[in-house]
Structure formats: C-alpha cells, structure tokens
Image (cartoon, rainbow, N blue to C red):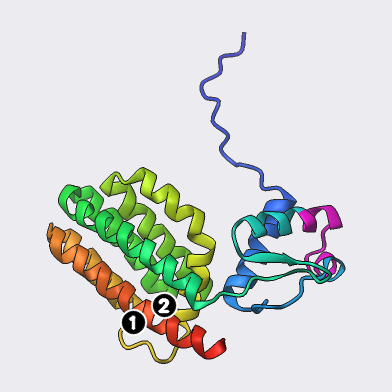
Amino acid sequence: MIAIHSLRIENTPVTLRELALVKVRQAIISGYFKAGDRLVERSLCDELGVSRTVVREVIRYLEAEGLIENLPKKGPIVARLTWEIAQQIYSIRQLLESAAAEDCARKATTEDKQKLHTRLMRIARASEHHDDIERVEASQAFYETLFSIAEHHIAWEIVQRLNSRISRLRAMTLRSPERQVAGFERMSRICAAVEASDPQQAREAVIQHLTEAAQLAKTILTTEE
C-alpha cells in the first residue's frame, strides 16, 4: 500500500477562463477598457486568444461583479461608474474599514504587525515602479490582512463582493494628479497606528484616507458625468 502523506495540491492549475477573467478585469480597472465601451465577443476572442464560450463566461462573471452591464440592443458594455454608486461604496468602506482598523490595532500581536508592515512595503514597491495594477492588488492584500487580524471575517466577505468596483475606484484616484496626500502615505498612517496599538488613531487614519479618496472620486466622476 502506498502511504499518502498529504492530499494538498501544491500547484493549483489555472483554467483558461480564470486567466481570461483576470485579464479583462484588469483591463477595465486600469482604464484600458473605458466606461461605456462596447465589449464585442469576436474582438475579445481575438485579443485574448480564447473561444467565444470562454468570453461569454467572463462577461457573465464580470457582470455579477458590477464591472459590465448588458444593454438591450447593444450588448455588454463597461459599466458606467457614477458618483451616486461611488458614494455608497465609500460609505460602506468607511463603516467597515474604520471598525476593522480599530480592532486590528487592539488585537494585533508583534507577528501580526510585521505581517501588515510587509503588506505595506509591497504597496511601496509598486508605487516606486508606478505599477497601478500591482498597487491596487497590494492595497487589497493590505486590507485583507487588516480585516483578518481584526477577526472581522463577515465584514471582509461583504468587502470582497465590492472589491472589483473598489479596485476600479482605487485605480482611478491613484492616477489623479489632484491627490493631496499619496495613498501610500495615508496607509502608512494606518499601519503606524496599528503598530502603536492605538485603536482611535487607526480609526481616524482610515476615515481621513477614505474622505480624501471620496472627494477625489467625486471631482472626477461628476466632471465626467
């Protein structure tokens, strides 16, 4: 009998659909596909090098994430992001993230603080290389760690459902020349408050960060509208 030491799959296979999904999602978040752009199946098949079945699956998935909408007689387009939608997202983020930051600062161990700092340094490296997609993904990893340390698991599930639209807003504000304080600096203040075990300061740092981001988003989106 052959002894089985572990059932863990070390290298998880990535399907063609998953790869295509990541590519199209990043293309929308980065602005390669802009709000209102039609997404023609044949063109996407050619650009991605995949079948029409894969493209249709990707479109359905991104429609569920709120990045794509299907219009009668027009088909799938990149969803328009209005200030009304963005305002609701920022309100939810402020409520959930400020509470998570507060509890994170209260509960974080020395090991937790080091882990959060490591996530922050990933954002720093992405900022140095002006890699918007990596900055967005690194920011998401930072917040996931924050919520995990705080043990706000249900709250993180709610945030995850909004993550594609959050990432789109984040990329948009990151590119804005009107940003008064760099996103990295704002997140550094959150991390510093956690490292100092200061719940109130952590909460305030999140609120300051999101208030400025929301104001930027409002300026950009209302101008576009």
Amino acid bearing label 1: Ala
Residue 54 is a magenta residue: yes
Whether pointer 1 and pointer 2 mark residues with C-beta atoms closer than 8 Å, the reply is yes
Q: Earlier in the sequence, mark 1 or mark 2?
A: 2
Residue 91 is a magenta residue: no
> Residues in magenta?
44-56
- Asked whether, in this view, residue 195 is left or right of residue 81, the answer is left
Q: Which quarter of the picture shows residue 199?
A: bottom left
Could you tell me if residue 125 is visible in this image? yes
The residue indicated by pointer 2 is: 127
In the image, 211 versus 189, the foreground residue is: 211
Q: Residue at x 64, y 60 (%)?
A: 22
Which disc, if any, is residue 182? 1
Could you tell me if residue 130 is visible in this image? no
Q: Residue at x 24, y 66 (%)?
A: 190
Q: Which quarter of the picture shows residue 45?
A: bottom right
